[in-house]
Image (tube, grey):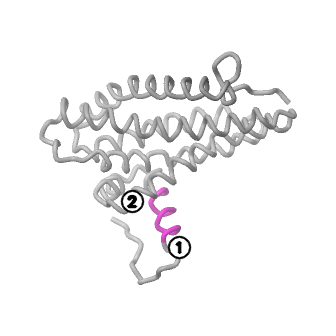
Amino acid sequence: MKYIPDDGRTDSAGHYQQLLDRMVRAARLDRTLYNEVATDATATRQASAVVIMASVASALAPFVTNVAGGGVNGGLGIALITTLFGILSWLAWAAVSWWVGTRMINTSAEDVEFWQVARAMGFAHAPGVLAVAAIVPGVAGIIGFVSLFWLLATGFMATRASMRLTDGQAVLTMIAGFIPAFLFVGIVVYIVDSAIGGAILGPSGSPTVIAP
C-alpha cells in the first residue's frame, strides 16, 4: 500500500499531492486504496472533491458548445445540472448501496457506516475527469464509452471493498442501488428545476444543448 509520507507540512501542497495520488490509484483499480479511504474519516472532503471535479469535467464540453453557439445561459444551466446531478447521484447511490449491501446482502457488514461507502464511491469517480477531453471534436463518443466502463469497474471495486462483499454480492448491490438512486435524483432535479422556472432544464425536461 502506498502512502504519502507525513513530513509535518501544514501547507496545501501535501494535501493536493495525496489527493492526486489517491485518484490515480483509484483509477488503476487499486483495491487497497478503496479500503484505505473507506476507513479514513478525513478523506470525506477529498472524495467530495473527486465527485465535483468529475462532474465539472463532464459539463465542460456541452458548456463550451453552448457558449460557442451564443447560449451562455444554456451552458451555465448544463454546468449546474451536471454538477448537481453528480453530487446527488453519488450520495443517493452510496446510500442505497450501503443499505442493500449491509442490511440485505451481507448482514455481517452491519458495522460498516454510510460514509465509509460514500468515500470509496466518491473516489470511484476518478476516471470521470477524462470527460474534459470531450471538448476535442470527434472524440466525445469514445471518451464517453471508455469512461462509462471504467467507472463501472471502479464502482465495483469500491462497492466490494467498502462492504467486504464477494464479486457476486458486489454486482447485486450495484444493480439494486443504481435504479432507485437515479430515479430519486432525477425526481429531485426535476422538482428543483420546476421551482426555479425551468432555468436548469430545457422545455423538453432535459438540458438544452445549442448546436454551434
User: Relative to 165, is 199 above or below?
Assistant: above
The percent coordinates of residue 36 (x first, y second) are 32, 59
Residue 189 image label: none
Q: Amino acid at mark 2?
A: Ala
Bin the neighbour count of mark 1 within 10 Å (Cα to Cα): few under 14, some 14-19, many 20 and up.
few
User: Relative to 13, is 81 above or below?
Assistant: above
Q: State if disc 2 and disc 1 touch (CB < 8 Å).
A: no
**Which residue is painted at 25% across and 31% down in the image?**
100
Magenta region includes residue 17? yes
What residue would you read off at disc 1? Answer: 12
Q: Looking at the figure, which quarter contains the N terminus?
A: bottom left
What residue would you read off at disc 2? Answer: 43
The percent coordinates of residue 96 (x first, y second) are 32, 32
**Which residue is painted at 46% across and 35% down in the image?**
89
What is the magenta segment's predominant secondary structure?
Answer: helix
Q: Secondary structure at mark 2?
A: helix
